[in-house]
Image (spheres, rainbow, N blue to C red):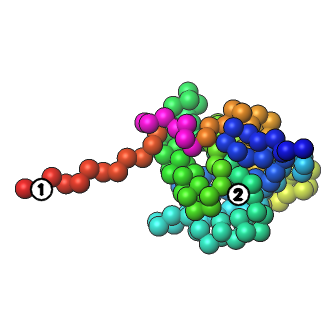
Amino acid sequence: MAASLDKSGIRRDGTVLGFDVGARRIGVAVGSAFGHGARALAVIDVHGHGPDWASIDRLRSEWRPDGLIVGDPMALDGGDQPIRLRAHAFARELARRYNLPVVLVDERMSSIEAAQRFASDRAEGRKRRRDAEALDAVAAAVIIERWLASPDDALDLSELPESAKPTRPSPPPTA
C-alpha cells in the first residue's frame, strides 16, 4: 500500500523536522504521525551571516526527514510582519539545500502555547527555569503538531503570494 502524501509531497506517515524562525534563534523539533506528535530537539543560533547551517545539516543527517515544516509568522490579523519574510527566505533555502518538500504552517500563538506547556511542565517538576532557552524548540514542536493535525492547511512554497516572494534589487542605472 502506498504512503499517503500531503499536497506538497510530504509523507503523512513520515518523519518531519519543524522550524520556528526567529531573528536570533531557530527552534527545531522532530515529529511523525507514528511518533504521536512532536518533540523539541534544538535551538540553532542565527548570526549576521544567517543560521548555523552546520548544526541544521547535522540534524537533517541524523533524522533523515521526509519533509520540512516551517512556521509562517503571520500577524494576528493574517497580514505580514517583518519576521515573515525571513521565515519565507529560510524555507526557500531549506528547499534549495536539501531538495525536500517544505511547507509553511500558520504559527500564530505557537509561542504562547509553547510557554504554557513549559509552565505546566515546570509546575509538575519536569522542567527547570534553565530549560526556558528551549522554548523556541517547543514552539517548533507545536508547529509540527499543527501540520500533523491538518496537513492540507499548510502552504506549499510554490503557493506563496507574489508579494511575499523576495525580489532581487534592480541594478543601479548606468550613466
Q: Position of residue 136 (x, y in %)?
A: 69, 54
Residue 92 seen: yes
Q: Residue 73: x and y, percent?
A: 58, 41
Most foreground residue, 112 or 97: 97
The N terminus - image quarter:
top right
* Residue appearing at x 66%, y 50% in the figure: 101
User: Residue at point 53% right, 47% down?
Assistant: 88
> Quadrant of residue 157 in the image?
top right
Residue type at mark 1 is Thr
Dominant secondary structure of the residues highlighted in magenta in the image: helix
Badge 2: how crowded within 10 Å, few (<14), some, or many (20+)? many
Q: Dot 1, crowdedness within 10 Å: few (<14), some or many (≥20)?
A: few
Relative side of 16 to 90, left or right:
right
Residue 62: quadrant of the picture:
bottom right
Label of residue 28 in the image: 2
Q: Quadrant of residue 25?
A: bottom right
- Give the residue drawn at x 46%, y 66%: 48
SS of the residue under disc 2: strand
Residue 139 location (% of width, % of height): 72, 48
Q: Which mark is residue 174?
A: 1
- How many numbered discs? 2
Q: Is residue 152 left or right of residue 92?
A: right
Provide residue 35's location: percent of width, then percent of height. 89, 51
Q: Amino acid at mark 2?
A: Val
Q: Is residue 161 magenta?
A: yes
For residue 42: magenta? Answer: no
| Magenta-colored span | 157-163
Determine the secondary structure under disc 1.
Answer: loop
